Amino acid sequence: EKTYKIAVLAGDGIGKEVMPEGLRVLQVAADRFGIKLELINFAWADCDYYARHGKMMPDDWKEQLQPMDAIFFGAVGWPDIVPDHVSLWGSLLKFRREFDQYINLRPAQIFKGVRSPLSGPPDIDMMIVRENTEGEYSSVGGTMYPGTEHEIVMQQSVFSRRGSDRVLKFAFELAKTRARKHVTVATKSNGISISMPWWDERAAAMAANYPEIEWNKQHIDILCARFVLKPQSFDVVVASNLFGDILSDLGPACAGTIGIAPSANLNPERKFPSLFEPVHGSAPDIYGKNIANPVAMIWSGAMMLDFLTGSSGAGRAAHDAILEAIRNVLATGPHTPDLGGTCSTTELGMAIAKQVAAA
Ligand code: NAD
Ligand code: IPM
Ligand code: MN
């Protein structure tokens, strides 16, 4: 029987507070469903490591992580010590690109007991599929005439046919497995006149392979407005790297809090380890108080178990049990302050772990 090797990288700030709860629930679920895990801590990919070594990770990070079945990741960023682009390009963004985790799958769902800031009771249940290796996040560009009044800064977006087609395909395949079988393609082909009309063409070509899937494209500005006005109209939403980043904070915010939003950074071919992490960051403003919501971390662990086992058998059951426990605990409380409650990170984690262990 296989033992899954999990790299544990807690990172900075509340990453260090939510990780223990993520691991607590992961372990309880794995035990209950007979999944063997080997959890391996790595004391790098955080800003303290940078302060000591002048870099985010050891040079052989890739050799160390390649043998892992998955990476369980907290959050990185401590802008007082390391500029954000340095810490993130030195860790998370490196993982995504060098491990070709080209899908960033980010669900947003409303739960009983969690109050949406929107009026009415919007029935939110969407999957944001974010392109995760190219697009607006490129390192192509530079500064001309620096320090002069002629200074010009340029940064190019990169859209490859392979990169666009594979994320579009993933979105349509995902829609096939869902009840509503609907895809919304985020675009901005009215303003961004080279890459986005091309992206629309790739989307239409992909959609032609899926006659059973209903789809439309929406410009990112009105799409954001409709996330707020009509969130129940979305099922699968596929977007470029930056648009997907924005939508994946907005969707969960509409569903009440970003503190519960998980993500799966997937290399679907399993050539490289995939990475599972909360959507949120290191939240320096609340770090040290043990009040961060651990649900995003815990739910990310559920997605990891599901993916590890190929969405079959024990892993799927463990995923569903964790989601059920999250649903139950959110419905009754206790709640962390982001949900209007007063409980701690640890208390919420323990309440969910207890539910997973029971039954
Ligand atoms: P953030 O997500 O860290 O925080 C935004 C706001 O949401 C803050 O008010 C924070 O208190 C709140 N919040 C976030 N997670 C929460 C949780 N689990 N429970 C309760 N409240 C929560 O975003 P930011 O402030 O833009 O970034 C802070 C740092 O994190 C920066 O260094 C940034 O680059 C980094 N960051 C990292 C990741 C990542 O590692 N994946 C993601 C986003 C931001
Ligand atoms: C996320 C984060 C990262 C991103 C940052 C920290 C680089 O916001 O995972 O959503 O933009 O991808
Ligand atoms: Mn983000």
Image (cartoon, rainbow, N blue to C red):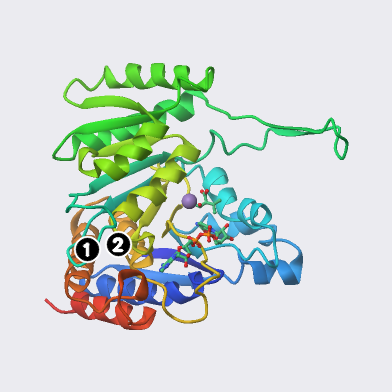
Residues tagged 2 and 1 counted as in contact (Cβ below 8 A) = yes
Q: Is residue 278 visible?
A: yes
User: Looking at this view, is 259 or 70 the one in front?
Assistant: 259
Residue situated furthest front in the rendering: 119
Question: What residue lies at 56% left-to-right and 54% top-to-bottom?
Answer: 92
Is ligand 1 less than 8 Å from the beta carbon at label 2? no
User: Looking at this view, is 175 or 316 the one in front?
Assistant: 175
Q: Can residue 33 be seen in this view?
A: no
Q: In this view, does 56 lie above or below 224?
A: below
Question: What residue lies at 13% left-to-right and 40% top-to-bottom?
Answer: 179
- Mark 1 is surrounded, within 10 Å at the Cα level, by few (under 14), some (14 to 19) or many (20 or more) other residues, namely some
Residue type (three-letter) at the residue carrying disc 2: Ala
Residue located beneath label 2 in the image: 302
Question: What residue lies at 30% left-to-right and 31% top-to-bottom?
Answer: 184
Q: Is residue 118 above or below residue 184?
A: below
Between the C-alphas of marks 2 and 1, the distance is 7 Å
Would residue 189 appear left or right of 29 to someone viewing this image? right
Residue type (three-letter) at the residue carrying disc 1: Leu
Residue located beneath label 1 in the image: 323
> Which element carries disc 2, helix, strand or loop?
helix
User: Looking at this view, is 283 or 162 the one in front?
Assistant: 283
Instruction: Pinpoint residue 209: horizontal percent, then vertical percent.
Output: 26, 19
Is ligand 1 less than 8 Å from the beta carbon at label 1? no
Instruction: Pinpoint residue 69: horizontal percent, then vertical percent.
Output: 42, 57
Image quadrant in which you'd find residue 319: bottom left
Instruction: Pinpoint residue 270: horizontal percent, then vertical percent.
Output: 41, 46
- Mark 2 is surrounded, within 10 Å at the Cα level, by few (under 14), some (14 to 19) or many (20 or more) other residues, namely many
Would residue 222 appear left or right of 95 to someone viewing this image? left
User: Looking at this view, is 290 or 164 the one in front?
Assistant: 290
Query: Which one is earlier in the sequence, the residue at label 2 or at label 1?
Result: 2
Residue situated furthest left in the rendering: 359
Would residue 150 appear left or right of 219 to someone viewing this image? right
